[in-house]
Amino acid sequence: MNGVRPVKAGWFNAFRPWTLHGAIVAVAIGGAVAYKDGLFVWWLFSLALIGGCLLQSAANLLNTYGDFITGTDTVDNSLRTPELVTGALRPNDVLLAGIGCLLVTALIGAVFIWEVGWGIVPFGVAGILGAALYTVGISYKYHGLGLLSVFLLMGFLMPLGTYYVLSGTVSEEVLLLALPNAFLVTAVLSGNETRDYHEDRRTGALTLSSRMSYANSMRLYLFLNTAPFPLLIALMIFGALPWTASFALLTVMELKELHRNSHLAPQDSRSNQLLVPLSFRLNWHFGALLILGYLFGHQGIPGLI
């Protein structure tokens, strides 16, 4: 890809810490509702946040391993994940690092079982299996199920699991607050699949996006990034969320930039690479403002009012 600089191969890129916003926002949504309900426990929330980030890290590492083992990542398309195809890291080391993240997450889960009971187990098992089997084992990414899994697991399961850790129960309000973010966190993966569309088609990686036409893949990406805005407005109109949740609508200019970039992406390699970062940024900023607006609408900003 002319004009696109390769990343530096190494553990930092393998872990991809800049993707952790997906887990942070999801866990914070569950924590925000628990805070509003007077059920917030800092140390449990902190463990949930660490566990969520470890699951995201495990998914990143095992995706790198799985894409290499299946031949999806090659020397010809190694700009974004060069660790294994260039020999900078060894496949078994990356695999063991991913498994290590899952084992630590399981230990955190054992603490949660001690504190809130066995009801947390389905959340933990689903999260661990979702991270572990993305491109390893059943490799559901290659069966076109990646976007659906992110929508369900990170969009809803992680916020609900966090609330359960803090309260011992589930909450409909968590689902409502999580709904706009579920679309945005899925949009990040959609951007990834659209960015890699031609390479995935060439190597036979059958993601959901690569099973479509390129135009429809881009339409899906734009829909997932845009849908949270009217959804949030509807939730406020019907009283499901406080009007201060509209803080998140301030990111509409970022959405406009994302749309503008999408029109350039088919012909411009740099714009194509920006599909993911622009979606990252929108997810992070929209999610953070949504949570702050929600808390402000119910109780004021914690620690200030």
Image (spheres, grey):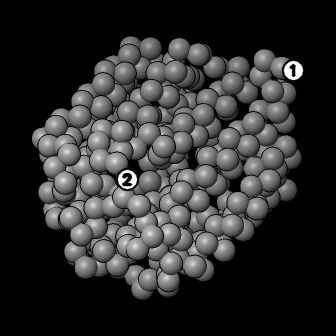
Q: Residues at badges 1 and 2 in contact (C-beta under 8 Å)?
A: no
Mark closer to the observer (1, 2): 2
Q: Nearer the viewer, residue 132 or 113?
A: 132
The quarter of the picture where the C terminus appears is: top right
Percent coordinates x, y for residue 287 in the rendering: 65, 45
Closer to the chain start, of discs 1 and 2, is 2
| Residue at horizontal 22 percent and vertical 75 percent from the top | 204
Q: Amino acid at mark 1?
A: Ile
Vertical side of 216 occupied by 72: above or below: above
Q: Amino acid at mark 2?
A: Val
Vertical side of 180 occupied by 11: above or below: above
| Residue at horizontal 53 percent and vertical 64 percent from the top | 274
Numbered badge on residue 305: 1
> Exactly how many numbered labels are in the figure?
2
Vertical side of 18 occupied by 305: above or below: above
On the image, numbered disc 2 is attached to which residue? 7
Residue 47 shown left or right of residue 167 in the figure: left
Numbered badge on residue 247: none
Label 2 residue SS? loop
Vertical side of 56 occupied by 211: above or below: below
| Residue at horizontal 29 percent and vertical 47 percent from the top | 9
Q: Residues within 10 Å of mark 1 (few under 14, many from 20)?
A: few
